[in-house]
Amino acid sequence: MAVPKARFFFEEVRAIYGEVADRFQLSGPVEKEWVVASSRYSVGELVYAVMLDRREGSVVTSVEVNSDSIFLSMELEDLAMALGVVDRRGGFSESARSQKQLKNSLLGQVVYVELVHPLLSEGKAEAVMIQAGARRWR
């Protein structure tokens, strides 16, 4: 199996996250390919960062709050657990060793975005993420 190229990753993220981005009025995607390919959707200080690590063959979504005074980040599944919207780990895959695995992983991860977003909206993201134990960078 071959890990998908960044071009395919970006196409799949746009296709899978597009409806959710529209519904939650998220801007993006902002797509970059540096060490890992990343596609970011945001509203205000809240950012959903979807990243493809071709070396590891994995795709992960992290949730971030990025403001002038603070930068917080937390893996999507960890946040969902901390907020109590899921009761156990393993609700989605992070495997991206093939195009099919990438697509299935993204489909599972976007469901978690739909679960956590209502709790992070309306300017509550920073407080909720701190309470959930997000990693604080500044």
Image (cartoon, grey):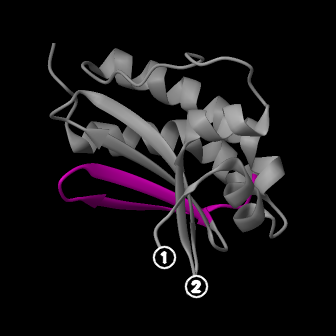
In magenta segment, residue 37? yes
- Give the quadrant of residue 17: top right
Residue name at image x 41 percent, y 53 percent: 39
Residue 31 is left or right of residue 128, and the answer is left
Question: Which of the 4 image quarters holds residue 121?
Answer: bottom right
Mark 1 crowd level (few <14, some 14–19, many ≥20, 10 Å Cα): few
Residue visible at 48% across and 42% down? 61
Q: Which residue was labeled with disc 1?
A: 138
Number of on-image labels: 2
In the image, farthest residue toward the bottom? 68
Q: Please state which of residues 51 and 99 is positioned toward the viewer in this rendering.
A: 51
Instruction: Answer whether labels 2 and 1 touch (C-beta < 8 Å).
Output: yes
The numbered disc on residue 11 is none
Inspect the magenta stretch and tell me whether residue 54 lies in it: no
Residue 61 to residue 101: above or below: below
Q: Amino acid at mark 2?
A: Ser
Indicate which disc, 2 or 1, sits on the residue closer to the N terminus.
2
Find the magenta span and give its range: 24-42
Of the 4 image quadrants, the one containing the N terminus is top left
At which x and y percent is residue 60?
42, 37
- At which x and y percent is residue 56? 21, 30
Q: Amino acid at mark 1?
A: Arg
In the rendered structure, the answer to whether residue 18 lies left or right of residue 122 reads: left
The residues bearing labels 2 and 1 have C-alpha atoms spaced at a distance of 7 Å
- In the rendered image, the vertical position of residue 85 relative to residue 11, given as above or below: above
Q: Main secondary structure of the magenta part?
A: strand
In this orientation, which residue lies closer to the viewer: 81 or 48?
81
Task: Give the percent coordinates (x, y) of residue 132.
Answer: 70, 48
Determine which residue is flagged by label 2.
69
